Image (cartoon, grey):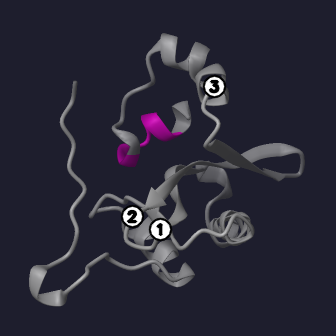
Amino acid sequence: MNAYAMDAMGGGQPLDAHVVDTIAAELAKRPYAFSFIGYVDGKAASLINCFELFSTFACKPLINIHDFIILKEFRGYGLSQKMLGHVEEFAIKQGCCKLTLEVLSGNESAKAAYLKFGFDNYQLDPSAGHALFWQKPL
């Protein structure tokens, strides 16, 4: 997670020491959180953190990909498609209706990987425009 946070696409700053020390335990407390770690030659190369949510329109669960990290030295080897495939397979087994994620508009390599996998901008009616992800810090 820290490698992702320190990347320009993750904010460019290291995680707070408290976050580093407690994130695994805090995620483990959440029954709808799960992660996949990808290894290359015994070394952790990629990580996806996900949460099961619920689609009120489909009345089915969905999976939100909250974090997706591929360490720089392992980029360009097709790991994104393999990791997303594991999440998709898990979601299908859980009876989910869709996968969701957020991506920065300037993260061209991630956008290309997501488009290749079948993701696209979300919209209900083209005349209403695309969905936007907003936040309000607390």
Disc 1, disc 3: CB below 8 Å? no
Image height of 42 relative to 88, above or below: above
Point out residue 105 in the picture as x, y percentages from the top left corner. Answer: 27, 64
Q: Amino acid at mark 2?
A: Thr
| Residue lying furthest right | 42
Point out residue 22 in the picture as x, y percentages from the top left corner. Answer: 59, 16
Q: Secondary structure at mark 3?
A: loop
Q: Secondary structure at mark 2?
A: loop
Which residue, given by chain and number where applicable, does mark 2 sit on?
Answer: 56
Q: Look at the image and give the residue range highlighted in magenta.
A: 4-9
- Residue drawn where x is 22% and y is 68% of the image: 131
Point out residue 78 in the picture as x, y percentages from the top left corner. Answer: 68, 72
Q: CA distance from mark 1 to mark 2?
A: 5 Å
- Residue drawn where x is 21% and y is 42% of the image: 135
User: Taking 64 as reference, is 24 left or right?
Assistant: right
Comparing labels 1 and 3, the label whose residue is closer to the camera: 1
Q: CA distance from mark 1 to mark 3?
A: 25 Å
Q: Which mark is drawn over residue 59?
A: 1
Disc 1, disc 2: CB below 8 Å? yes
Q: Please report whichever mark, 2 or 3, sits nearer to the chain's N-terminal start.
A: 3
Which residue, given by chain and number where applicable, does mark 3 sit on?
Answer: 29
| Residue lying furthest left | 127
In front of the other: 103 or 72: 103
Q: Amino acid at mark 1?
A: Cys
Image height of 58 relative to 47, above or below: below
